[in-house]
């Protein structure tokens, strides 16, 4: 099983930007923890981060063909990118949306989540654990999908 871990804008600065909100672990350190869990549960992972909307759209399209599931932190695009929402709605694989901070407890504009209705589910507010739980959820959902396909349901 192959899972793409995709990160949107500004997440390359994780660990340095607003550490009181996002913590002090860098994206590389977070990816290491995800890779570690993936290894323990026998899943292959690839990582990609982009600050560009179209590039994230391209990666989601690619994931629809080359991966079994996606763990996706869309960053601020979660709140307004209809192009990314449409990309997520266009692919057959489960996309689990994750946020490190509790977006519901912050500014009002962060409560509007335009990708959430078409994502498989969301994990929000648990810091690095949002990604780790997101990976477990993605693997479970992808497994169910593969089994359903095999059974022709
Ligand atoms: C975020 C939350 C978003 O509102 C914000 O724009 C981010 C990070 C999070 O992981 O908590 O860039 O997705």
Image (spheres, rainbow, N blue to C red):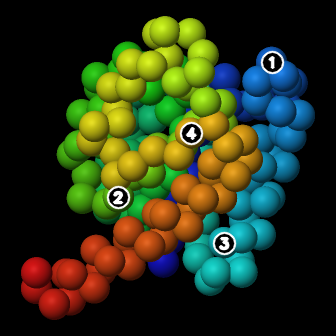
The mark that comes first in sequence, 1 or 4, is: 1
Name the mark on residue 38: 3
User: Which residue is disc 2 drawn over?
Assistant: 94
Name the mark on residue 18: 1
Residue 85 locus on image (x, y percent): 30, 32
Q: Could you say whether the residue bearing mark 4 is in a helix, strand or loop?
A: strand
Residue lying furthest top in this view? 108
Label 1 – label 3 distance at C-alpha: 28 Å
Q: Is the C-beta separation of discs 2 and 4 under 8 Å?
A: no
Q: Is the C-beta separation of discs 3 and 4 under 8 Å?
A: no
Number of the front mark, 3 or 4: 4
Label 4 beta carbon within 8 A of ligand 1: yes
| Left or right: 33, with 93 as reference point | right
The mark that comes first in sequence, 3 or 4, is: 3
Residue 24 locus on image (x, y percent): 89, 34
Label 2 beta carbon within 8 A of ligand 1: no
| Left or right: 61, with 124 as reference point | left
Q: Is the C-beta separation of discs 1 and 4 under 8 Å?
A: no
Number of the front mark, 1 or 4: 4
User: Which residue is disc 4 drawn over?
Assistant: 124
**10 Å crowding of disc 3: few (<14), some (14-19), many (20+):** some
| Left or right: 139, with 13 as reference point | left
The answer to whether one can see residue 41 in this image is: yes
Q: Residue at x 39, y 19 (%)?
A: 112
Label 1 – label 4 distance at C-alpha: 17 Å
Label 3 – label 4 distance at C-alpha: 20 Å
Q: Could you say whether the residue bearing mark 1 is in a helix, strand or loop?
A: loop
Q: Could you say whether the residue bearing mark 2 is in a helix, strand or loop?
A: loop
Q: Nearer the viewer, residue 51 or 139?
A: 139
Number of the front mark, 1 or 3: 1
């Amino acid at each position: 099983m192959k899972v793409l871990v995709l990160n949107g804008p500004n997440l390359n600065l994780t660990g340095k930007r607003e550490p009181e909100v996002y913590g002090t672990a860098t994206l590389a350190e977070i990816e290491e923890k995800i890779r570690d869990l993936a290894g323990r549960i026998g899943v292959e992972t690839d990582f990609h981060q982009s600050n560009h909307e179209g590039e994230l759209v391209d990666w989601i399209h690619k994931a629809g063909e080359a991966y079994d599931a996606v763990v996706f932190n869309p960053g601020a695009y979660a709140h307004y990118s209809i192009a990314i929402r449409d990309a997520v709605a266009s692919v057959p694989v489960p996309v689990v949306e994750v946020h490190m901070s509790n977006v519901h407890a912050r500014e009002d504009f962060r409560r509007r989540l335009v990708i959430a209705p078409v994502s498989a589910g969301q994990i929000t507010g648990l810091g690095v654990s949002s990604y780790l739980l997101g990976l477990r959820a993605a693997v479970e959902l992808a497994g169910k999908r593969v089994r359903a396909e095999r059974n022709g349901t």
